Amino acid sequence: MIRSLLRPVTDCLKYHLSLPTARSVTLLVAAFLLYLFGNQTQVGWMFVMSALLAGTVLAAWMLNRHSLRGVEIERKVGASPNAELYEGEAVAAKLTFRNAARLLAAQIRATERCPLAGLSSPQRRLDLFVPLLLPRRGGADFEYEVEIDRRGVHEFPPLELTSRAPFGFFRRHRRIDRPTRVLVYPEVRRLRHLRLLDHRLALEVVRPRAGVGTEILGVRPFRSGDSPRRIHWRSVARTGRLISKEFVDESRPGLTLILDVCKHPYPLTAGKHTPFEWAVKVAASIGDYTQRRGYPLHLLADEDAWPPPSGHVARLPLLEYLARVNPTGRRPLTDILDRESPFITPCVATILPWPDETVLEPLIALRRRGLAVFAILLDPSSFPAGGPAAGPLADEMRASDLEVSLVRFGEDWREQLDPVEQIANLPGKVEDYAYAGEKIAH
Amino acid sequence: MLTLARKSPTRNILGKLFVLFAYGMAALCTWVVVMLFMKWPYGWATWIPVVCLGGAAVFFACVPKLTVGIRRYIKRQKIEPSIRLRLLAFVAQVVGVLSLGYGTGLWGIAAFSAIVLALGHLYSYRYRAKPKRWVRIVIFVLFHLTFGWAYLGIVNAWPQPQAQLAMLAMAVVSWELFKRLNLYSAMGMGLINLYAACTLSRDLVFGGFLTAYFGVLLAFLWWADSEDGKRSNPIVVKHRFVSAGVSRITPGNRWLPASRFTFYALRFTLVLVLAGVIIFVFYPRFAGVPIAPLLTIRAPLQGQPPSEIINPAVPVVQIEGWSNESSDYYYGFDSQLDLGYRGGLNDTLMMYVRSPVWSYWRSHAFDRYDGRHWAQSSRDLKPIEPAGSYYFRFIYPFPSGDYFVQTYYIERPMPNLVYAGGKPTDMIFPANRVSMDFTGGIRAPQALQPDMAYSVWSIRQDFDPETLRAAGAEYPADIAETYLQLPDTVTERTRELARDLTRGAPTAYDKAVALRDYLREAYPYNPFPPPQVQDADAVDQFLFVDKEGVCEHYASAMVVMLRSLGVPARLAAGYGSGTHNPITGFYEVRAKDAHAWVEVYFPEQGWVPFDPTPGWTRDPYSGPMRRWLFSGATERFGMGGLTSSASQIGAAGAALLGALSGPLSVIGAVIGALGAVVALGWGSWALWQWWRAGHPPRFRGLHTHPNRRRIFAAYRRAQRRLRSRRALPQTVQEHAATRPELAELAAAVDVAAYRPEPPDGGLVEAVREWLRGLRRGRTQMRSYRADADER
């Protein structure tokens, strides 16, 4: 408690003053001793030596005060400011030191704490030493490559600089805050095939408007462009607003990706391999596949906690959403399925990071409505932090005639979503579906 | 020394004995240094450091655990791999050796030391990871033998034995420079050598050595920080220099453009020089009690001072008639001064005087004048026995007054006259006995030799004209009888001139001043006056025939005239102050500074000096105490009463400090003593905490009951015997699982640790017996009454 109370004072002293080191104390003691001996022996040279020692400390203090004043840094992550960074990829970072002051800055010790690196990665903390720094023109560059450990928004902490120049008599600290925010997308593995979608018709056309079929799906508020013949007058009389009928277009392609962001009792762990993280990776991979194949994608999740982008979700908005989403929602998935059911596309992929048996019925209901339902279950019991097994739920779902993929930790989920034996049945060449540079992420 | 002790039981005892021996040797060496080098005035005080160091040696040898912190710190130091740092340390040490060689003239020893230094550095680098044990033992022995070498030097009057010790000891220690800490020590030893050299330095050449050392020191510190930076922050970021808009890495990434680095270095140097000069100029200086000069004392002079003054030059350079040649030696430093001698004096440096006060350095005086010669009427010398080691008191008890200390460093053979300024009260002189003549002149047993040094305490003479005027004219009979003597050769015109010049002078002081001023103004100085006419009175010839002369003539004329007026006076001889060098702090006294002046007796005031020689100081009283650099500026530059505001401010500040120096020294001593006690207490507590942190008690808080402690102690003993220590995160049972023979003992330990009631004596006894059985190979604990356990 005392330390926390004194911290502002110590920080003020540390970052605003040049603090003496043991070396300066030693020299001052030596100067004092020589002064005493000089008084004893009346040797003039001793006074000179004492004065020189004391003067050295004083001169060093005067130079050390300004040693870090003009130092500036610039940080670049990735090839360009708009570069897309994905979890698991290696990215190049560059840290540039410049000295804007006239006085030479030297012997600068800096610690770069890269939040992109894993906790045990050597790039997590980089201890740099800049022997010499030229003033104004030129500088010092440090480039390093780091394997991005996790998705999300990462902010580089302030850079701590320390200098003991010249000669190590005083220590000067400076904290340079250059906020560098980096958005890392989740890992995406290219699926070669997704049977949920690929078994449908080959031609996918994105219709500009919904409800052009013949079967009534439900009602919705009137939108400009709707035909007056589609107005549901009974609802208008009841509600006093214009209501149109919504028709199902059986030939309309599209996938609704449902992500369970409810705050399940996930085991606490500092590791990055959790069922939810893998669920996000799976969602990203599926989203990537739909984008490549041209299928429109809708995203469904708890709007109170993590409102997803509405309507067709493009690639980047999807990745940005998946980069940020966390399992903090309060509403279970069943609530969302029940509420959002009129707006679901023919194909539904539900990603369940936690085995929630209550979603079985809503999924069965969707199946009965003629929608293609695909459940992707993550098995928490296979993950390092443990959890309940998802196998029984998967069996139940299969028994209910739902398509289920059970993804276990350590296995490539592409194999689960896209078994190898089905590749031969696909039209086209296998190479069309190959993912260049694929890797196994563990 | 500490690392040479081994850890096994038998060797541990040998190691402790070895450490004890090592510390004892160190205590002995300290005794040698203190007894023979420092020459403290009080014999009993010399034992203080010996007792302290000896006591510390015994204490640390018997309680080695207290040195564990030091040993751990030394062990943590890493081997220094940097060649650059070693080279810089070597250069710094060589600078120290060269400075001592220059100061002492012992180039042979300096060269030998430099060679040994080089070899030592090479060996230290080559075997830094695994030094040879036999070499370390040899170095240890050689280091102590250097003290023996110094002792032999003292006994056999070798030149500068202490300087030889400093050089040789540093050379020997250079074979143990394995770690960065050792290199720092090496730099420190170089500084110590410089310190020794600066006490011997008489000129400004030492400044070159000092500059070189500081340059090397700063370079060393810079590179040490660079090495440390690379060690702690292993990723070195190379700089890039933009030239003509093109960014490029500088060649080899080693060197900066000279202009940028030069600017940085110049800025630092400018600030350093400015700060150093300001600090040096405004340093307040106090005339402290000197410890006798450490590096210049030789074997003491033996014998009894003879009644005749020993002047090495006499009779070689005494020239009668006329001569315009100059020599090193002044014929006035003799039992008799012949006013007929001619010959000038050259610029030969005779001695250095370190004194905070300006003064003439008086040797003796003459009282009897026969028309041509000055002599001492009595050859009797009063022997002065030493009151301590080479310590002589002239006046006791010491009168009150403003004391100052002068230290004399003899450069050329000089007469056996001890020069002193002011009114000497006591001195440290390298002789078994000295004598004093009736004029207050101090005599040594033998002629003074080069490299000899001695110190004198004196009272400053500061006479007030009004006090002297009020002194009156009632002279003691012995003073009147001796110092009013005049020969018949004194002419009437001399007496008449004296009366004429002092007609308007009511007091003796006014008469002296009138005569002095007349002589200074009316008679020009001529270092080569006409030859003395035979059978003519020297004073008469000077005053009325030649009307020019040298200092003896002026002084003689003033003494004769004063005596003719009934004022006791005598002719004093010695050296003028010489030239003061503010950097070295020395007065450089040369042959041409030899001088004669007048001393006039005033009742209750004593002998007051006057100088009638033109170009010399009228009132050669002791000057003010030189508290800082500009103390004597006004006098030196002839500003007279004009004082600059800067000197006033500085003098006022320094005077305040000087006034407080007495009480400050007491307060300082008290604070120092308290600080030492606090530091010792804190240091001991810190070491204790450090040791406890490394040896945490296993069952903290459970040591209240003796039976519990006994069982825990038995468990620890069992672990040592079985050579199987329980790891900290391991429980006793877990440990016992790995060593089944400890199972029963582990159960007893659990009882002792966790049961609320402490174990009874039966369990303790059973544990002890088990332990005894363990020694014999049995590991089964006998059963005991377990009533307490079953409760």
Image (cartoon, grey):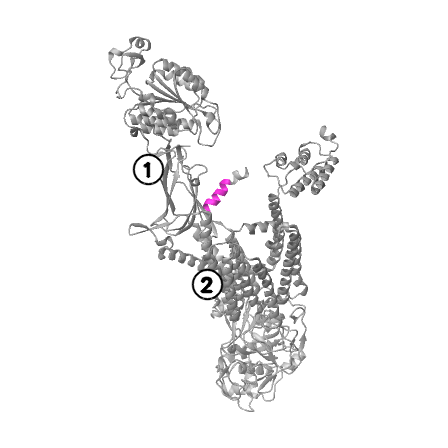
Identify the residue position indicated by label 2 in the image: B212
Residue B322 locus on image (x, y percent): 50, 88
Q: Residue furthest bottom?
A: B535
In front here: B222 or A256?
A: A256
Query: Magenta segment, which residues?
Result: A7-17
Identify the residue position indicated by label 1 in the image: A81
Q: Is residue A13 magenta?
A: yes
In front here: B535 or A352?
A: A352
Q: Is residue A101 magenta?
A: no
Q: Mark 1 lies on which chain?
A: A
**Which residue is drawn at the image coordinates 36% and 48% (left, top)?**
A139
Residue B405 locus on image (x, y percent): 59, 68
Q: Quadrant of the N terminus of chain B?
A: bottom right
**Mark nearer the viewer, 1 or 2:** 1
- Give the amino acid type for the residue marked by disc 2 in the picture: Ala
Residue A429 locus on image (x, y percent): 28, 28
- Give the amino acid type for the residue marked by disc 1 in the picture: Pro
Could you tell me what secondary structure mostly forms the magenta stretch? helix
Q: Is residue A265 above or below residue B764?
A: above
Q: What element carries label 2?
A: helix
Residue B523 locus on image (x, y percent): 49, 82
Q: Is residue A344 above or below residue A179?
A: above
Q: In which quarter of the image is the C terminus of chain B?
A: top right
Separation of marks 1 and 2 at Cα, in angstroms: 53 Å
Q: In this view, does A293 lie above or below B728?
A: above
